[in-house]
Amino acid sequence: MQQGARLADPGEFTKWAFLNGRIDLTQAEAVMDLIHSKTEAGQRAALAQLGGELHRRIRHLRESAVRLLAEIEAGIDFTEEDLQFLNQGQMRALLVDLVNGADALAKTATSGKALREGIATVIVGRPNAGKSSLLNAMLLQNRAIVTPIPGTTRDIIEDYLNLGGLPLRIMDTAGLRETEDLVEREGVLRTRQAIKEADLILLVLDLSQKLGEEEQRLIEETDEKRRLIVCTKIDLLPENARSQDQVGFLVQNHHAEKIVCISARTGEGLDNLREAIVREIRSGIVTCGEREAMINYRHKSLLTHAKMSLQDAIESIDRNAPPELIVVDIRTAIDRLGEITGETTTDDLLEKIFKNFCIGK
């Protein structure tokens, strides 16, 4: 450094690979995803993107839009020539295909977010229902304080769990009840906010106590969310009462496979719960295979803007607008798609992306 050298900036080696055309911007971002991945599923998704899977999907959309733009502009420039160009029906059909392609790719954002940041899994229930015991049993460590005193947990306790290769950001929360305690009341407010933002709810019900109106209210309160009902403390019940079928009012209104009975103390039913969680995640949260293209929120925002521009072009066709107006919207869509891969970019964007890298990576 005394001779004029300097330390590498964050992400500098990856940035030079991008600037020299060795990789595109989605592949550069995949390097950071690979570094930060917490599970094998996240690693596979990052490697697929690093291998160019997302680049190929975006390039296909962009090249299709460029070909369509060229056809329309040729029709504008050579109106006097005796040549055949796309009619409005053909242009509209191609634009609809582009919109559908952009929309399908945009829908992978949820899976991508879950694998990159972890599936937000929130444990909720009444005080002393066994939520903290469940967290400890899932993590195989005493992460949360457990006492017989209701309301022990006042704040959200969060940790990461690798479950079947999937990263869970699992959270223990304050018990939901009316309280005059200011600290506990704040904990309840944070619990309700966590419920709103959760990918998956684990609703804990204490089977050693009579289930009644409070439990039914919690079921209704979380009914719009993706949820599993976890019936706890089955070790305190008689042997013949440990069946899910004994939870009558639950089974009447909910799928039996969404109800799992466990004992955090003995470990009974925990394997069934883990399987149910993985099944629930695979059925609606992480719906893409890890080797498929999955976008992040930067990509989603740009894809959404590209799709809106393409839809504007379709509306222009439906209004019989001049082709000069149609090409403006298509050019905008092409630019937005180019921003995803870095074919059209700015210094501010590059600085924002690469500053989050580890030093020199």
Image (cartoon, rainbow, N blue to C red):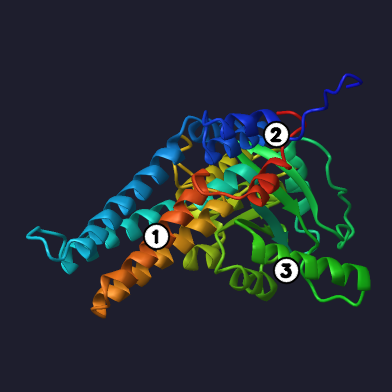
* Residue 311 sits above or below residue 284 on the image: below
SS at badge 2: loop
The residue positioned farthest toward the left in the image shown:
82
Residue 11, numbered circle? 2
Percent position of residue 360, x then y: 74, 28
* Residue 141 sits above or below residue 276 on the image: above
Percent position of residue 161, x then y: 69, 39
Q: Is residue 168 or residue 353 the one in the foreground?
A: 353
Q: Residues within 10 Å of mark 3 (few under 14, many from 20)?
A: some
Sequence-wise, which precedes: disc 3 or disc 2?
Answer: 2
* Residue 348 sits above or below residue 95 on the image: above
Residue named by callout 3: 192
Q: Is residue 280 at all visible to an observer of this figure? A: no
Q: Which numbered mark, 3 or 2, is in the foreground of this view?
A: 2
Residue 331, numbered circle? 1
Percent position of residue 44, x then y: 53, 31
- The residues tagged by marks 3 and 1 sit, at their Cα atoms, a distance apart of 44 Å
Sequence-wise, which precedes: disc 3 or disc 1?
Answer: 3
Q: Is residue 64 left or right of residue 160?
A: left
Specify the amino acid type for callout 3.
Answer: Arg
Q: Is residue 153 or residue 307 the one in the foreground?
A: 307
> Residue at 69% of width from left, 73% of height from top?
214
User: Which quarter of the image is occupied by the N terminus?
Assistant: top right
